[in-house]
């Protein structure tokens, strides 16, 4: 077998694998390479070795194993050698190793992760730069394009954000290349950079194919669409424009359109999966939107049905009321018709009695011997009754009405004149029934008589009280003496008198059905506690070690000052721990009360309050703030059994006491409340807690708020409750923020108070609860009386009102605080300045309920509570509640603004009243009534315009003039009085608008002839 060299076998000797050790150190490592090599391949070693080993290469290449080191020296025996050349192994190895090592180092440098990340950073920055310059090119296309087309690179001419280089890049991409398709090239460059930075790792080849193909397709399609457009830039670039120009020239417009459609279809196929995903997301969004709209429509339909049902119920109630009144009126007319008939019957009775007595005079002796004298009277009475009924049916003035009244009225009429004594009736029917049936009665008459008797039997119980006043003894005496004197006739007439007073059955029916004040808003639902944040119970705020440490420090400190104690106990609250101590005998309370500052120093506490002694306990209390105070959530208070089972009229759930008990108070029994404290100590949160606790317990028909907010931001959240819980002047804003309207509102409440007290006086009730109970039991006339809801007046910053208007505010407030309790009007006054100038003695005298948050000075605490203590609080809702001098330390419940908003939105979204509860309109003294002639001659400049407005709108109200012309109440009232003096409007009607007396033509005549 020949051993000559064959060029075909030369690749066998090429080592294509990279060896890092070889590239760095110049020699091959001992590790195995993944590429198989022949056993006789020359090794990079210092030994002399022939690079070719004859046919041994074929044998070695056929075997699966190979050697990694080669150690033969010289020519091996048994192998032939090449002729004519001598190969030096060292020179060959060095000549082949040097270029391969350089390429390997370059490739290794390129493949290094740091190099790749650097290149990715460069690509990302370059892509961002290209995006900025292309957008700037569009914004400054006039100057940049002119500079590029004219070859002028003057920096002063180019306006591009990237300078001349940026203008050139943008011009190249957008004008010379692919137009807006170049943005995909920028995206491609950014994607490659982010992939190298390992931020975004897309598949390389799909990304490349999609970006390039989409860019070309956009260039072609935009070039065709904008082919005829006069635009300073080719939207498809020169590529798209020139390509479409050639296509239109060669194939016509249809050929170019077909190419664009093909490219567009290809792009759609590339992005088919994404388009399907987008379509699915869009479809899901549309379905969700449609479902939400359907839900809203269903909700609106439900609300509409509820309003319709409420309207039908209201109409049914009105119709029932109208029927009731019609029934009462018919009953009144019937009674009025009965009275003349009864009078005629009574007038005829003496003559008939006299004739009856004379007719039976001959048989008087026989009757006395065979029968009792009562038979004569029985027959006479029956005859009188028959005559009376016949005369009433034929000739009575109300016969037509009574004949059409029906069976009920017939059954009521018959017993009135059929006799009043059941014994007499039984005797008459027993003795004379056979004679009457045989002589006078037909079968129809007998049937009618039987029905009359059955009706009389059924109504026996009803008729008996009507004639219970008849004097049977007088009848018996008259029969025994056989006289028909006037006294006997009077006795016979006595049973007829009660017939004019018929029991009012309609009133009895109404009395059996109590009035329901919640019926108008029967669909109203109280807000749920889920609108409030859930309670987070973190366990006790004071651990055992801290409590024992405080006990020991208190004992040591008191002993240091000579105060011995016999016992000490601790009660842990949410923010304060109460340590109750029992001093040893002989220790004076005054000596402990003066140690507050010393105890505060020893315990390193913020504020230590000493209660010496605790009322009704015989101990001395030392309140020490906890190092880790807890927050009392409003939900934990409203969700408690104490609040849910409360029977208070106006329950205020304020928070928790030191013993972790829910603290509640009844505003209706206070009856007014003063809230004061320094800024940021929890006063606004306390007001929100009070309002929220009332909203969760009282129906809109039972409670109304009058909110005065000088700061304009604290109570604005409750504007959603306008149609449910708020009260205001007619046409005015439900929340009073304008200081010029506050005096009017307060005086309007005084008028409302006077009106309510008049109603209470007429009803004979001492307070609003008794009055409403009578009205619910239908013991009051609904035409003169009405159900009275509680009214709670809340003034957020009372000091600001006093500073601005002084006595004008203080007088009505003092009057309301003194008298309004019985009328169901209660005040909650809050202020940040508890000084004697703001909280005067007249106001404090009638406001026994006090809430004091932390204040800075002891004088402020004395102003609020009449004693010290509020200056020793720790803030953040820590407060003292005082009622009639009894103090209670409470941690106020926390309710945040989002929770208040959620509650108001929940209530505001429900069906409410048409308008807020209207307060009576107030007219200041001296502005009502007629005005003098001098005032008539000096009319207001707005008089004519206001008069035309009043006549055109047919509404004469002082508040409407205020809103329309933005004038004060005094000026608007003066204009209204001038119109009254001119005969345009009528006099004031309290809270109702005045009556317009003229039309437009008459008004113009009045204005011309003034």
Image (cartoon, rainbow, N blue to C red):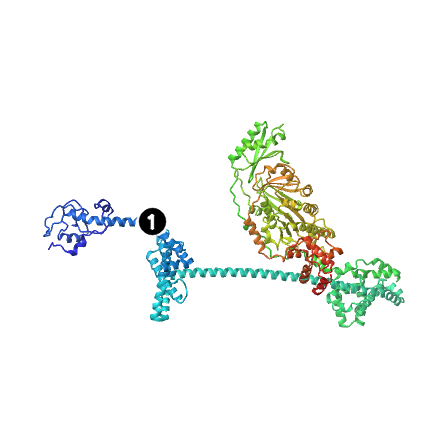
Q: Position of residue 844 (x, y in %)?
A: 67, 42
- Left/right of residue 571 with respect to residue 217 in the rendered view: right
Measuring 26% from the left and 48% from the top, which residue is drawn there? Answer: 105
Instruction: Check the picture and name the quadrant holding the C terminus.
Output: bottom right
233 left or right of 505? left
Q: Secondary structure at mark 1?
A: helix
Q: Position of residue 15 (x, y in %)?
A: 21, 51
Question: In the visual, does 727 lie left or right of 240?
Answer: right
**Quarter-of-image position of residue 564:** top right
Q: Quadrant of the N terminus?
A: bottom left
Which is nearer the eye, 389 or 211?
211
Residue designated by label 1: 118
The image shows a total of numbered marks equal to 1
Task: Tell me where residue 253 appears, x and y as whole percent.
Answer: 37, 70
Quarter of the figure with residue 443: bottom right
Q: Is residue 942 visible?
A: yes
Q: Nearer the viewer, residue 811 or 350?
A: 811
Vertical placement of residue 41 versus 604, above or below: below
Residue 786 visible, this orientation: no
Query: Residue 583's spot in the image, x, y percent?
Result: 60, 30
Q: Residues within 10 Å of mark 1 (few under 14, many from 20)?
A: some
């Amino acid at each position: 077998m020949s051993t000559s060299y064959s060029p075909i076998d030369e690749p066998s000797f090429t080592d294509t694998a990279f060896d890092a050790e070889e590239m760095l150190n110049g020699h091959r490592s001992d590790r195995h390479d993944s590429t198989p090599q022949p056993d006789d391949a020359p090794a990079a070693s210092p030994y002399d070795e022939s690079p070719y080993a004859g046919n041994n290469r074929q044998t070695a290449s056929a075997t699966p194993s190979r050697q990694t080191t080669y150690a033969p020296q010289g020519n091996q025996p048994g192998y032939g050698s090449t002729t004519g050349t001598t190969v030096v192994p060292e020179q060959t190895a060095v000549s082949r190793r040097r270029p391969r090592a350089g390429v390997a180092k370059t490739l290794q440098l390129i493949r290094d992760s740091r190099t790749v990340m650097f290149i990715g950073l460069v690509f990302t920055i370059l892509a961002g730069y290209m995006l900025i310059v292309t957008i700037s090119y569009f914004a400054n296309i006039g100057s940049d394009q002119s500079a590029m087309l004219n070859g002028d690179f003057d920096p002063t001419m180019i306006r591009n954000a990237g300078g001349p280089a940026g203008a050139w890049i943008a011009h190249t991409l957008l004008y010379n290349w692919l137009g807006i398709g170049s943005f995909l090239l920028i995206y491609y460059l950014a994607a490659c950079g982010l992939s190298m930075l390992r931020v975004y790792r897309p598949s390389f080849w799909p990304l490349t194919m999609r970006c390039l193909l989409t860019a070309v397709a956009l260039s072609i399609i935009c070039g065709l669409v904008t082919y005829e457009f006069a635009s300073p830039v080719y939207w498809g670039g020169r590529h798209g424009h020139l390509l479409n120009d050639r296509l239109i020239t060669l194939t016509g417009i249809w050929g170019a359109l077909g190419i664009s459609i093909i490219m567009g279809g290809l792009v759609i196929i590339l992005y088919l999966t994404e388009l399907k995903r987008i379509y699915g997301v869009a479809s899901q969004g549309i379905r969700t939107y449609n479902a939400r709209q359907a839900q809203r429509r269903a909700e609106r339909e439900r609300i509409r049905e509820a309003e319709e049902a409420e309207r039908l119920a209201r109409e049914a109630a009105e119709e029932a009321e109208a029927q009731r009144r019609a029934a009462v009126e018919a009953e009144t007319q019937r009674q009025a018709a009965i009275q003349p008939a009864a009078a005629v019957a009574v007038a005829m009775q003496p003559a008939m009695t006299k004739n009856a007595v004379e007719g039976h005079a001959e048989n008087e002796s026989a009757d006395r011997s065979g029968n009792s004298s009562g038979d004569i009277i029985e027959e006479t009475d029956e005859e009188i009754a028959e005559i009376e009924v016949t005369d009433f049916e034929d000739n009575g003035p109300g016969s037509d009405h009574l004949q059409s009244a029906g069976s009920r009225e017939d059954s009521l009429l018959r017993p009135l004149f059929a006799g009043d004594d059941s014994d007499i009736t039984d005797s008459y029917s027993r003795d004379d029934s056979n004679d009457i049936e045989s002589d006078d009665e037909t079968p129809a008459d007998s049937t009618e008589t039987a029905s009359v008797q059955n009706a009389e039997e059924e109504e026996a119980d009803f008729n008996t009280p009507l004639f219970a006043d008849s004097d049977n003894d007088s009848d018996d005496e008259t029969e025994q003496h056989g006289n028909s004197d006037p006294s006997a006739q009077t006795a016979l007439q006595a049973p007829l008198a009660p017939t004019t007073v018929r029991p009012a059955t309609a009133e009895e029916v109404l009395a059996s059905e109590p009035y329901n004040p919640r019926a108008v808003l029967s669909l109203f639902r109280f807000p749920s506690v889920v609108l409030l944040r859930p309670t987070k119970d973190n366990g006790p705020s004071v651990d055992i070690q801290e409590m024992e440490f405080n006990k020991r420090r208190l004992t040591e400190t008191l002993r240091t000052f000579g105060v011995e104690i016999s016992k000490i106990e601790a009660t842990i609250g949410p923010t304060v721990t109460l340590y109750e101590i029992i001093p040893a005998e002989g220790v004076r309370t005054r000596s402990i009360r003066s140690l507050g500052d010393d105890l505060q120093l020893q315990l390193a506490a913020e504020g230590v309050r000493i209660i010496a002694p605790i009322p009704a306990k015989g101990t001395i209390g030392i309140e020490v703030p906890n190092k880790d105070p807890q927050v009392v959530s409003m939900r934990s208070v409203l969700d408690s059994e104490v609040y849910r089972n409360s029977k208070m009229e106006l329950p205020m759930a304020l928070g928790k006491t030191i013993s972790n008990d829910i603290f509640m108070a009844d505003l209706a029994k206070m009856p007014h409340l003063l809230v004061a404290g320094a800024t940021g100590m929890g006063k606004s949160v306390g007001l929100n807690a009070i309002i929220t606790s009332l909203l969760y317990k009282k129906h809109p028909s039972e409670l109304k708020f009058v909110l005065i907010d000088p700061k304009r931001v604290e109570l604005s959240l409750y504007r959603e409750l306008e149609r449910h819980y708020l009260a205001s002047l007619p046409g005015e804003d439900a929340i009073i923020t304008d200081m010029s309207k506050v005096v009017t509102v307060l005086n309007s409440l005084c008028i409302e108070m006077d009106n309510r007290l008049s109603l209470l006086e007429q009803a004979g009730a001492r307070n609003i609860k008794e009055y409403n109970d009578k009205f619910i039991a239908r013991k009051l006339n609904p035409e003169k009386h009405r159900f009275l809801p509680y009214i709670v007046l809340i003034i957020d910053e009372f000091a600001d009102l006093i500073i601005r208007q002084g006595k004008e505010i203080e007088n009505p407030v003092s009057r309301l605080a003194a008298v309004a309790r019985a009328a169901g009007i209660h005040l909650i006054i809050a202020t940040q300045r508890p000084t004697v100038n703001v909280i005067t003695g007249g106001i404090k005298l009638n406001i026994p309920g006090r809430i004091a948050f932390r204040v800075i000075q002891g004088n402020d605490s004395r102003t609020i509570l009449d004693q010290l203590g509020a200056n020793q609080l720790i803030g953040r809702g820590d407060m003292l509640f005082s009622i009639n001098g009894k103090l209670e330390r409470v941690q106020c419940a926390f309710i945040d603004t989002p929770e208040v908003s959620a509650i108001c939105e929940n209530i505001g979204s429900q069906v409410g009243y048409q308008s807020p509860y209207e307060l009576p309109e107030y007219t200041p003294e001296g502005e009502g009534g007629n005005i003098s002639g001098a005032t008539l001659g000096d009319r207001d400049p707005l008089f004519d315009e206001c008069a035309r407005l009043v006549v055109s709108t047919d509404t004469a109200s002082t508040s409407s003039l205020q809103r329309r012309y933005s004038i004060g109440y005094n000026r608007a009232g003066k204009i209204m009085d001038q119109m009254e003096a001119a005969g345009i409007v009528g006099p004031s009607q309290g809270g109702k608008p005045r009556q317009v007396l003229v039309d437009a033509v008459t008004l113009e005549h009045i204005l011309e002839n003034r």
